[in-house]
Image (cartoon, rainbow, N blue to C red):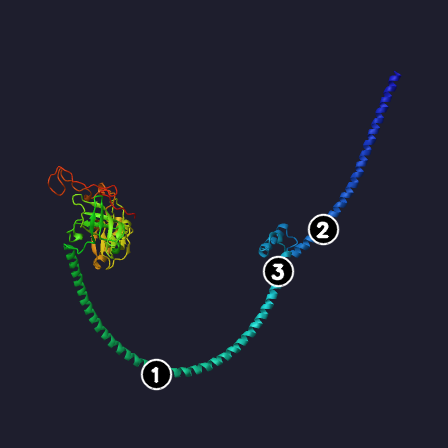
Amino acid sequence: MAARQDQGLVFTLIAFVILFIIAFVAAYVGWKSYGDSETRLASLQEQKRNSDAAVATKTDEANQLRTMLGVGENDSQEDVKKTYDDDMNRHGATFGKDQRSYRKIVEYLAQENQAISSREASAKEQLKEAKDHLLAIAAENEKAVAQYRAQMQAAEQDAAAERDHHKKDRDSLEATKRELQDNLAQQQARYEEQLAAINTQLKELTDRLTKSERAKDNLLAEVSKSAESFEVPDGRVSWVNQNGTVWVNLGAADALRRQITFSVFDADALDPAKTEKKGSVEVTRILGDHMAEARVTSDDPRNPILTGDQIYSQVWHRGKQLRFALTGIIDLDGDGRSDMKLARNLIELNGGAVDAYLADDGTVKGEITVNTRYLVLGDFPQEARQAAMQTGWTTMGADAKTNGVEVITIDKFLNQIGYAPDDRVVQLGAGARASDFPPRPEAGTEAGSGQSSPFRPRTPNRSSSAPSGSYLRFSP
């Protein structure tokens, strides 16, 4: 029992010691915390005193700045900001946002004030110089006015003398004018008399010209109606063989050339231009001064070419170049297209010359003169788009009439020179021509005879070198 009591006492003692230690530590910690708090409180109080001093200093500085800025000491920050914004908007609108300050504006105003002062001083100096210059000019003007007045007085004296002289000249001019007017009236009277005489002569000449035109038209009409055209053969057939070759009595001395074509007429024909031809020949070789070889290009088997037959070309003339004009649509092969170039080449190939021709665009190339022998008429251009060609046709016809040029058709022209195309194009439909479809003779009847015959017309033998119906071809 005693042992157990001792153990309880020990435990109590230990617990008391532990509680003592805990209480000591707690007291130490509390004392230590109180000391630190006192120290911190003293430090904070010192900081407060320093802050109050700084605030007082800043307040004094702020009041000084308000005074310097021109605002009240008791104005709020919003009032100061409003005053600053108003000043910047009114005085510093031209400054950038980062340049807006009272110092910048004051410096700028000082610089501007200095510049204005400098300019004002310069202006005052210039004004003084201008006044001095003006005074000098005024003095010079006074001097010039005095000189001008002297000159004006002299000029008035000269003007008076000139007026007297002018009056004398004017009187002389008036006398001359009256004399000229009298002469003009006399000349006008003579001119009217001469004009009346000229008009009388012009009327007489016009009447004579009208009568001459009528006489010429009547003469041309009579000539066109005459049975004779006064055309003479160019030569004769000297010899004919059976293979389509003939010889003619023309040659180098007659200026004959190869490829010239002649129409052939009977030996007793009096007027080749009014007589039906019996065939045509083309010159192939010049054999002498008055001899040439030719080939038969067309003939009539019922009326063959014989020795002594006459030859004639409307283009070629011995020792003379005939001149032609071509108008209208020259269609040699009936294909509906113009062969104007081929016709011109044909005339030149046969020794002739083309004075004028109607181009496809309606313009007249060249000129018809009194030396032009024939105007060859092609087909009249009837389409609306060929109005220019119709005008050219009329113009060339009038020129031919004025110059007394004989007018022949293209068919008559080609027939007289003995030309025929190789290929004949026959158009059908609206473009067909009645002449392309001649009436056929009745069966067993010879054309033009009116008598029945059981035999076909005989055709002379032809060699392969000159077949019947062969024609001359020209390259355009």
Check the image and report above or below for 193 versus 354: below
Q: Position of residue 159 (x, y in %)?
A: 40, 82
Mark 2: give few (<14), some (14-19) or many (20+) Cα within 10 Å: few
Amino acid type of the residue that numbered disc 3 sits on in the rendered structure: Leu
Q: Earlier in the sequence, mark 3 or mark 2?
A: 2
Residue placed under numbered mark 1 in the picture: 168
Task: Give the label on residue 109, or none.
Answer: 3
Pointer 3 with pointer 2, Cβ within 8 A? no
Q: Pick out the residue farthest to the right.
A: 2
Check the image and report above or below for 203 versus 280: below
Q: Pick out the residue farthest to the top.
A: 1
Total tally of numbered discs in the picture:
3
Q: CA distance from mark 3 to mark 1?
A: 80 Å
Q: Toward the viewer: 253 or 202?
A: 253
Q: Earlier in the sequence, mark 1 or mark 2?
A: 2
Q: Secondary structure at mark 3?
A: helix
Residue placed under numbered mark 2 in the picture: 56
Can residue 418 be seen from the camera position used here? no
Q: Nearer the viewer, mark 1 or mark 2?
A: 1
Q: Position of residue 213 (x, y in %)?
A: 18, 61
